[in-house]
């Protein structure tokens, strides 16, 4: 696996992502991070349909730890940075950082398990670096 492959995804904060005060609702960060993880895997040639079809498995989140640093606001353009921290035979640990410009809004460590259709652990497929720069 390549060292510290980083993927970046830009997201805009919509009204539906905020609370009554126009501040990003805490659960919205989870949606932003999920989209970024999905696009990161897609950039590695591992979209969800391919994982299920070719490897008979799918990822499930088993743990998320989030540190909220600053609030995101309505209409902000945020960048979600995703990278692989470590892997085991059937688990993938990812670090994700959500920024507005240079300000860190949230940092999270996410652990994913790769499971079979019968919900049993499966060996992770080989995750290769994307061929084009992100």
Image (cartoon, rainbow, N blue to C red):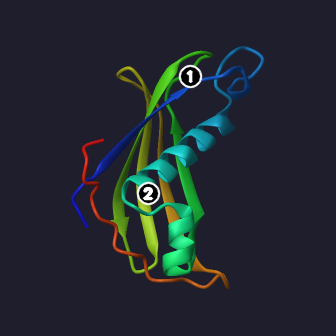
Residue 20, above or below 63:
above
- Image x and y of residue 109, in percent: 46, 52
Q: Which residue is mark 2?
A: 41
Residue under the image location 27 percent in, 58 percent down: 129
Q: Which residue is mark 1?
A: 71
Mark 1 lies on a secondary structure that is loop
Give the class, few, some or many, for how many residues have Cα within 10 Å of label 2's Cα (few <14, many ≥20): some
Direction left: furthest residue: 3
- Image x and y of residue 117, in percent: 65, 81
Query: Is the residue under label 2 in contact with that under label 1 (CB below 8 Å)?
Result: no
Residue 49, above or below 27:
below
Distance in Å between CA atoms under marks 1 and 2:
27 Å
Residue 2, above or below 124:
above
Which mark is in front, 1 or 2?
A: 2
Q: Taking 7 as reference, is 10 left or right?
A: right
Image quarter of the N terminus: bottom left
Residue 24, above or below 114:
above
Nearer the N terminus, badge 1 or badge 2?
2
Q: Taking 133 as reference, is 50 left or right?
A: right
Residue under the image location 52 percent in, 65 percent down: 112
Mark 2 lies on a secondary structure that is helix
Image quarter of the C terminus: top left
- Image x and y of residue 55, in percent: 49, 79
Q: Quadrant of residue 102?
A: top left
Residue under the image location 46 percent in, 72 percent down: 91
């Amino acid at each position: 696996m390549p060292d510290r492959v980083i993927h970046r995804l830009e997201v805009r904060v919509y009204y539906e992502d905020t609370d009554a005060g126009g501040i990003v609702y805490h659960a919205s960060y989870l949606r932003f991070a999920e989209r970024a993880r999905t696009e990161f895997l897609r950039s590695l040639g591992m979209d969800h349909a391919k994982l299920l079809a070719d490897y008979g498995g799918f990822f499930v989140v088993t743990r998320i730890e989030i540190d909220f640093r600053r609030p995101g606001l309505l209409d902000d353009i945020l960048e979600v940075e995703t990278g692989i921290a470590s892997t085991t035979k059937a688990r993938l640990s990812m670090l994700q950082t959500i920024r507005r410009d240079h300000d860190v809004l949230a940092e999270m460590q996410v652990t994913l398990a790769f499971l079979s259709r019968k919900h049993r652990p499966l060996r992770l497929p080989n995750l290769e670096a994307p061929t084009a720069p992100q």
